[in-house]
Each structure stands twice: as C-alpha cells, then as structure tokens.
Amino acid sequence: MVNYKKYGMNLYEYRRSLGNGKIKSLFTSFKTSFTENLMQKLARLVKTAGIETIDFQDHYAAIKIHFGEYGNLAFLRPNYAKVIADIVKEQGGKPFLTDCNTLYVGSRKNAVDHLETAYMNGFTPYATGCPVIIADGLKGTDEALVPVDGEYIKEAKVGRALMDADILISLTHFKGHEATGFGGAIKNIGMGGGSRAGKMDQHSAGKPYVRRRLCVGCGMCTRVCAHSAITIDERKAEIDHEKCVGCGRCVGVCPKDAVTPEFSESNDILNCKMAEYTLAICKDRPCFHISLICDVSPNCDCHAENDRPIIPNVGMLASFDPVALDMACADLCNQQPVLSNSVLAENMEQHKHEHGDCDCEHGHDHFYFTHPDTNWRSCIEHAVKIGLGTDQYELIEV
C-alpha cells in the first residue's frame, strides 16, 4: 500500500504522477480511534477517493445496495448507507437506496415484501436519510432494455429506476458466493440490477417451466405473455417453449411461485453475463464504487441465514473502477488468516486430508476452497476483456 500524503500531493496529483495505467483503489481498515468512528472513516475514504468530483447538483443518485434476506444478519448496516446518502445530499444530489426483486422465492420477490424486509432490516428513510425504491417495480417486471452487444448478452433487462438515475453508486458487502465465487461490486450491480427477467437471463440458458402441483390455473401468466406461449389446460398452465422467448414476465407475476426459471447456466458463463450486465448499467454515466469487507460469510446475503465468517474483517475500499475494486478486495481477502470452524477451514482440512496440502494450482484462494465449483477469475477476466475496467490497481491506504 502507498500513503500518497507523504509525497506532499493530493490524490489526483498522485494519480498523474504514476503514469503506469493502474487504477487507484483506496483502502482504510476498521481500526478506529477516539476521534474517528467507522462512519467518519467511510466518509473520509470516499471523499479522498474523489466522490465529490461527481456533479450531483439536482441529479438523482441510485445507491445500489443489498438489503439482506430476512433472517440474514451479515448485510451492511444501514448506518453506512446514511453516510453515502448524506454526502450526496451535501453536494446537492437526490439519493435513493435501491435493489431489484429476486428471481427465487423469498422475502424480496416483490416490492411489497422487499420493502417490508428492507425496513425490518433497518433501511428506513429515517435511518438512512433517503427513500428506498425497488428498481424493477411491484412484480419485478418494470424494466429498461439496455443494448450492450456483449458476447452473451445483446440486450440487458435492468430495473427501470436504476437506469433512470443520473448517477450510480454501488455500496457492496464483499462476501463469498456459492455460484460466482464471491459477491463484489460486479455482482451487486450486474446481477442485483437485473430485473427478474434479467436475472433469469443471466442464470439460465433455458426457459421457465410450470410446477403443476403449485399451479392453480389463475391465468395471470397468460395475460402478461406477449407471445401467446402460455395456455391453461385443466386448470394448469402450460408453456410452449417453441413460442416462449424467455422474457421471464410469467415468473414475476405468478402469485403461487409455480412458474420457475431453469437455473441451467454454467458458473463461468454466469460470471461473464454478470460482467456484461454491469457494463450495460454503468456505461455512459458517472459511477462510483464502495466495498466493505466485513462479516465475510461463505454465501450470498440472499440466504435467509448467514454462516460463520471465513476470514476476519478487513476494511473498506473505494474506486471509480468496479473491476479494480473487486480485484483489490479479492487479493486482500486471500491475504487473511482462515477463521477456525468456518466452512473454509473445514474444506481446507478436507482437501489436506485427501491431497496432502493446499498448495495446488489455486494456491491460497479462499473463495475457491470455500466453493470449489466456482471460478471468480472468469468474471474478472471477462470484465477486462469487454472494457468494464482493469484488474491492474494501486492500493492506497488512507
């Protein structure tokens, strides 16, 4: 890490002086003092990283955050969101916290349940200083179609409120993930920003199907299908996959969760699609990214529970580049000791028992050993390839 202040220059002078093409990711630890608490450290971090260089005056700023599934306690505290919202308001902006509805059945599958969960988890306007808006609407069908011309995605389906915002700020809880290796800024934006159809677009190479035992034949799915692909026969819905285009609207409106996506995409392709969605959401507007490495649970905050953290708390990071930020977070995590009795510790012990040691091709990759079927590097590599950002960074401690 480099302490740029010792050079007697500000951050931007320091950036120009390097001239090595590396993006700056700023870092501060969770160590506090009697004169500076964690919220104050976060404010200092993002201001030093340059958030105030963005023109917020009279502009809508979407703060993309995960409100946590009900029952999970690893999500970021609302206090951190208030720090960012207050800074935006100080600069004349209009902030709002936002996320999109989930594809799976849970406490955030529609805007009514999603808002209730956000409030129960502490994300009220009184606690955060700004409103909560569910970006893809009541049933997850309010979306903007964003051209991206990627290798896998040609048109991203994104929560409309997220795309209507003038400025995007991602506020991410960095943790493990059972499909993507870890959940960082790219996952928060790309997967989190997709509407229900957008999430299905990323997770599945197939089309939805009907679980007949749950279907009551209400016909709501037939009314939203623009391609006449769904019919009701003997009070059960049937989907004609020859006509179905996989838009996912039937998944969003089904009141019984009988219409189900097929989670058929490989993890590597899922990671690539996620990067392309992030590019669609971030392009052509100011973006700023913040990640907190704390309570690093092995799985996503979408779970209705959170397991023991796999590593100690590390710190807070900020950058204008989501790829550099994710790479810096991953590197910092992999430098940490493994916490005993965690899933990671158990998996590493099992690997040692079967193979003798953990000095394999994956080295000390904590996220690989937490979920051996995942490959987070495929997301970073594809993100660099499509021009979302760079994996070359300079870590500056402030």
Image (spheres, grey):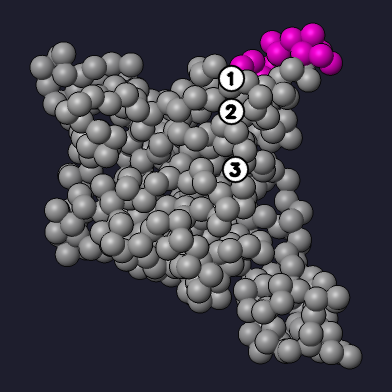
Taking the spot 18% from the left edge, 57% from the top edge, the residue there is 89
Q: Are marks 2 and 1 in contact (CB under 8 Å)?
A: yes
Taking the spot 35% from the left edge, 62% from the top edge, the residue there is 124
Q: Secondary structure at mark 2?
A: loop
Query: Where in the figure is residue 92, as x and y percent of width and height?
Result: 14, 59
What's the CA distance linking mark 3 and mark 1? 17 Å
The circle drawn on residue 310 is: 2
Is 349 in front, or is 355? 349
**Precedes in sequence: disc 2 or disc 1:** 2
Quarter of the image holding residue 345?
Answer: top right
> Which residues, given as a range, are shown in magenta?
352-365
Quarter of the image holding residue 128?
Answer: bottom left
Quarter of the image holding residue 178?
Answer: top right
The circle drawn on residue 308 is: none
Amino acid type assigned to the residue bearing label 3 in the image? Asn
For disc 1, the marked residue is: 338
Magenta stretch: dominant SS? loop
What's the CA distance linking mark 3 and mark 2? 11 Å
Is 384 in front, or is 397? 397
Is 305 in front, or is 11? 305
Taking the spot 73% from the left edge, 46% from the top edge, the residue there is 266
Amino acid type assigned to the residue bearing label 1 in the image? Val
